[in-house]
Amino acid sequence: MQLNLPILHLLENSENILIAGAGGGFDIFAGLPIYFTLKEMGKNVHLANYTFMHLKLAKVLSDPIIEIPGVLLGARGRVKHEIVYYPEGHLAEWFVEQGEETIVWMIDGNGVPLVQKAYERLIRKLKIDAIILIDGGVDSLMRGDESNPGSLLEDTISLVAIEPLDVPVKILAAIGFGTEQEEDVCHYTALENMASLIKAGHFYGSCALTPQMEAFQKYEQACRYAWEQPDRSKSHISTRIIPAVHGEFGNAHMYPNDEYRNSRLFISPLMGLYWFFDADGVVKNSLLADAIRHELTKHDAFTVALNFMSKERTKDRPRRQIPY
């Protein structure tokens, strides 16, 4: 069984596709089912992630490609020293275990101009003609006027960074609706934003992961490899997507003894759905995008975003419950 991607018509003429984690952390893992599906179709597919890892530390722990010092590194091969948190390095190592040498590009967690510079280099180097940004969760769809927008900043930085790039296809894929409990995301406003994007013609469709899909099985294997060695950090997004796809429901923990064991979960089939949008359309729908567009560092972008959203709070959309 194959993942029935609704975006294949957009990628028909694409030869070199970049799948990139938009919000950092383990977002790139959430894009693996798409990666494996497109690879199976014969596409050249590359991986990247807006990283929370210190690039200097990555150079100590492994032997990365230094593409732009302090801005863009490529994790590859095995990690030399065990570390709790290194999603890109552990993913690259999993590929080695499969007999593949796959580079996972690490885009340093900067503001828009430097993130854009990293994407420009990857586009030239890899001849990229399509970019699929991956969000584990749905806070990438937040506009900035919500009372509970989650951690939208990193996703917005990535979206704004790719907006001016000369790439024929730019897509945002979000998966994990309902997983962002710790971020206190209001899913009423997430659905409201989705509806706004649909009305504007920026929605490409959705599709579901199932346990029978080889692409899902490989994704789960990669996640388990990254998480199940002693003291490794886990993704609170994918540790909810995977049980949901297997049919778990309600307060079901994939790892009862992990750091999220005190969270009362509501696992549901909605968590295994991908939602695909025109990435530039999502930027047009954002109120925050222009405010952070020229901020060089993430710290500066955070300060500007905080001030912007504080002003918006006087007219924000309050938290509401889905009425069914």
Image: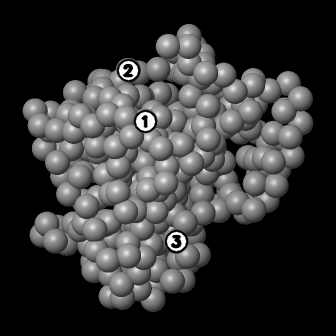
Give residue 90's position: percent from left, percent from top: 33, 71
Label number found at residue 286: none
Q: Residue furthest top?
A: 199
What type is the residue that disc 2 sits on? Answer: Gly
Is 241 situated left or right of 263 in this image?
A: left
Secondary structure of the residue carrying tag 2 is strand
Residue hosting label 3: 53
Q: Looking at this view, is 263 or 7 the one in front?
A: 263
Secondary structure of the residue carrying tag 1 is loop
Residue hosting label 1: 266
Give residue 159's position: percent from left, percent from top: 58, 42
Mark earlier in primary sequence (1, 3): 3
Is 250 situated left or right of 108 in this image?
A: left
Mark 2, residues whose alpha carbon is within 10 Å: few (<14), some, or many (≥20)? some
Q: Are marks 2 and 3 in contact (CB under 8 Å)?
A: no
Mark 3, residues whose alpha carbon is within 10 Å: few (<14), some, or many (≥20)? some
Q: Looking at this view, is 156 or 38 the one in front?
A: 156
- Marks 2 and 3, how far apart at CA: 33 Å
- Relative to residue 91, is residue 238 depicted above or below? above
- Marks 2 and 1, how far apart at CA: 24 Å
Is 206 situated left or right of 312 in this image?
A: left
- Relative to residue 52, is residue 252 depicted above or below? above
Q: Looking at this view, is 94 or 121 the one in front?
A: 94
What type is the residue that disc 3 sits on? Answer: Met
Secondary structure of the residue carrying tag 3 is loop
Mark earlier in primary sequence (2, 3): 3
Residue drawn at x 10%, y 32% as measured from the top left: 1
Residue hosting label 2: 205
What type is the residue that disc 1 sits on? Answer: Phe
